[in-house]
Image: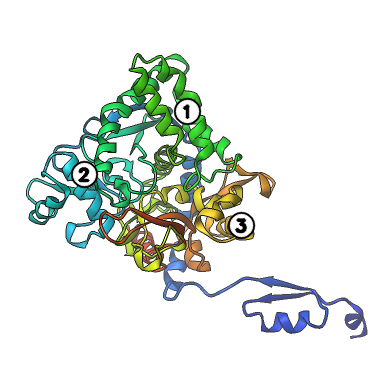
Amino acid sequence: MSAAMSTVPSVINVGADLLADAVSAQAVEVTRVDWQPPMPGTAGDLATVVGDPARAGANDRALQAVLGVTARLVDVLPASEAVGLQPGEFLHAGPPITWERASGPMRGALMGGAALEGLCASPEEAPTLFESGSGVSLAPCHSRSAVGPMAGVVTPSMWMFVLEDTATGRRTYCSLNEGLGKVLRYGAYGPEVLERLRWMSEVLGPLLQASVRATRDSVGPVDVTGILTQMLQMGDEAHNRNRAGTLMLMRDLAPAMVTSGGEATHVAEALRFIGGNDHFFLNLAMPACKLALDAARGIEGSSMVVAMARNGTDFGIQVAGTGDEWFTGPAQVAEGLYLGDYDRSDANPDIGDSAITETAGIGGFAMATAPAIVRLVGGSVPDALATTRRMHEITLGENPRWSVPVLEFQGTPTGIDVTRVCRTGILPQINTGMAGAVAGVGQVGAGLVTPPAEIFPLALSRLAERARDRVDD
């Protein structure tokens, strides 16, 4: 007893801080373990999935498949050619949605898209078209190997980036970025929005196609994954901050654009547009992340999330081991900073496929490498550092190519694991823009958001069901 009394005590506190605070007040060092019970109702399914002998190997294969992909920009094409969109077909962000359930910004983008394609004389006439369902159809971008920011509406005449994994030939696609403010992806559809989209189809798209093809054929395709590696060390997180990435893309494409034979005024307009749009590279970061994550789709037994997406009404995830099934819950309104006189009452619930960046380990997961992002989305620099550290608790590993200088070049947390989310209650952190709830308003702010907690137990339940079925077979 006397020996024990002479030893400096070592205290580890798990859970509530009551005991830790009392011991600490007596000048005793305490190690605090942040622990809480698993999400309610998940204990049985967790035991099944964590105990699945196929899971560890499946997750390792899924993570290595994601890390092994290099995305390269190989072409720029109209959506009619890239993904086979026919007149009257519309792609949109997030899980499947109908016009009846569509949010304000989704409706606004669809209305603008219908007018752009000449399906109606004006955007204001489009609701009748979509209500009737005659000659129009809606489908998620993800169903065509594509992604779309915010509303993510894609029509046949819009041009799309084409990214390819050289090793497998798999491709993913994304529309061109319009900039910020009153733009179609935020649900605006005024004359200036449609005029810009027509210019993008008539001038910007063909110029980008010529420069991408010339660059590809002369020095090799632009290495989008490589640019992501560099920009993460230059203060971008590749979701709401893409300044360095956009400038590096211009560096790679500008020479071929200048010598493309296009009209000098058009080339100047295109370069001015890209250079003045810090978000331009986002529409390359997104399909690059999808290309990597799609490499893990269909790996039976894997509990790794391969997509997070929102349509402004629902938030959905897809998991490697459950095919293309969506697990959905209500989209949340982000917490953040608002433009002008807008406030929370003006904001629509979260929308867009851009959370594919967080799913791949950048965006909100890489906030520590882009501390300046807090000036756009809110929070503080310590919050940004803590967020990246916290995301390591719910991921399967890290990406050594995408490293964080301030964290001793630790790789970004990669491979969201459904079981870890359910065990810890920690939800993925997403940096996002905020669209106005009313169609036609456009952007009202930017902020931080997490998925609805209930979608992860839904995915876990399906994983457990499949694990039991494999045992029965």
Q: In this rendering, is residue 335 above or below 351? A: below
Distance from Cα at disc 1 to Cα at disc 3: 32 Å
In the rendered structure, the answer to whether residue 95 lies left or right of residue 275 reads left
Question: What's the residue type where badge 2 is placed?
Answer: Gly
The spot of residue 96 in percent (x, y) is 24, 54
Pointer 1 or 3: first along the chain: 1
Eye-nearest disc, 2 or 3 = 2
The spot of residue 10 in percent (x, y) is 80, 74
Task: Identify the element where label 3 is drawn.
Answer: helix
The spot of residue 132 in percent (x, y) is 7, 55
Q: Specify how the rendered protein is coloured.
A: rainbow
Of the pair 60 and 294, the residue shown nearer to us: 294
Give the image quarter of residue 317.
Answer: bottom left
Give the image quarter of residue 331.
Answer: bottom left
In the rendered structure, the answer to whether residue 12 lies left or right of residue 3 reads left
Disc number at residue 250?
Answer: 1
Give the image quarter of residue 18.
Answer: bottom right
Q: Residue furthest front?
A: 341
Label 2 belongs to which residue? 113
Look at the numbered discs 1 and 3 and tell me whether their residues touch, using CB distance below 8 Å.
Answer: no
Pointer 2 or 3: first along the chain: 2
| Residue plotted at (57% across, 58% down) | 387
Of the pair 292 and 282, the residue shown nearer to us: 282
Distance from Cα at disc 2 to Cα at disc 1: 28 Å
Q: Residues within 10 Å of mark 1 (few under 14, many from 20)?
A: some
Question: What's the residue type where badge 1 is placed?
Answer: Met
Task: Identify the element where label 1 is drawn.
Answer: helix
Label 3 belongs to which residue? 389
Distance from Cα at disc 2 to Cα at disc 3: 41 Å
Of the pair 166 and 213, the residue shown nearer to us: 213
**Is residue 52 something one can see in this rendering?**
no
Pointer 2 or 1: first along the chain: 2
